[in-house]
Image (tube, rainbow, N blue to C red):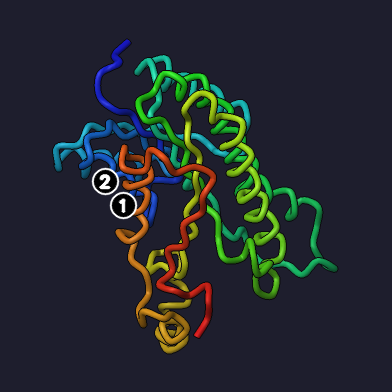
Amino acid sequence: MSTEGKVAVITGATGGIGFEVAKRLGHDGFTVILNGIDDEAGAKRVKELTAEGITAEYLGFDVTNEEAVTKNIKAIGDKYGKIDTLVNNAGGLGGRSRFEEMTTEFYRSVMALNLDSTFFASRAAIPYLKKGVHPSIINYTSNAAWTAGGPGAGIYGTSKAGVNAITRALAKDLAEYGIRVNAVSPGTIDTPFHAQIKATKPEVFASWANNIMLGRLGQPGDVAGVVSFLAGKDAAFITAETIQIGGGQALGI
C-alpha cells in the first residue's frame, strides 16, 4: 500500500468538466482516478493524461449503484492507503418532467443521479479521507438549488438543494477529522452537455451569454481552477461553503 503522493477520485470524469478537473488535479501532482460508465472513453482519457505525465487510472461503475460505488471506492482506498480528495462531479438534469406527469421512476432516477451518488461516494471515501493530507470532498450544486430550476427541471433543482444541505451536513460531521467539505456551483459552461442546443439553435445558445455579467459562457477550466484551489492547502480554512462559478449569472443583469 503506497501512501506517497496525493490521490484524487473524480466521478463522471470521462468528458466535459470532470475530465478538465482530472487533468488540472493531475498537473497539481495528484494521482487521479477517473470514474465513468463509458469504458472506451475512460481508456482514451487515461491515455491522454498519461501522455501529459499524469498518473491516472479509470474505474467504470455507475454512481447510482450503491454496491458498485462502495466496492470501487474501497478498492481505490485499499490500493493507495488513503484518498486525499473526492470530487463528486457526476450528475445531470436527467431529462425534464412537470410534476403532474412525473413518474416515480423519473423522480427517483434524478435524485439518485445527483444526491444518492454524492452520499454513496462520500460515505465510502470517509475512512480513507481520514488518512489523507488536507483531505476534502468537493460536491457540485447549481443555481437551480436556489431557483428550483426552469420548466420541467423542478426535481433537478430539488436534488441539487439536497446537495447544498448534505455539503454543509458532511462538513459538520467531518470537521473533527480535519476533512473539509465544499461545493461548487457552475453556471452555464460550454461543454458537450449543451451540444444539442448549440447545434440546432446556435442563436439561442449564443444569447445565453447576454444573461451573464462577464458577457461570456464559462469554460471547463474555469471550474477546474476553483476545484484545484478547494483541494489544495490554500483552502485549508474553508469548509461548508459553496462557490458560484457563473460570471455573475446568479445575480441576473
Task: Point out residue 27 in the picture as x, y percentages from the top left corner.
Answer: 20, 42
Q: Amino acid at mark 2?
A: Lys
Would residue 201 be found to the left or right of residue 84 on screen? right
Please state which of residues 123 and 69 is positioned toward the viewer in this rendering: 123
Q: Position of residue 188 (x, y in %)?
A: 45, 70
Quarter of image, res 38: top left
Check whether the beta carbons of the residues at disc 1 and disc 2 lie within 8 A of each other. Answer: yes
- Identified at 66% across, 61% down, the residue is 157
Residue closest to the far top: 1
Q: CA distance from mark 1 to mark 2?
A: 5 Å
Q: Position of residue 169 (x, y in %)?
A: 64, 39
Percent of width and height locating residue 121: 54, 33
* Local crowd size for mark 1, using a 10 Å CA cut-off: few (<14), some (14–19), many (≥20): many
- Specify the amino acid type for callout 1: Glu
In the image, residue 170 above or below residue 221: above
Q: Which mark is residue 23?
A: 2
Q: Residues within 10 Å of mark 2 (few under 14, many from 20)?
A: many
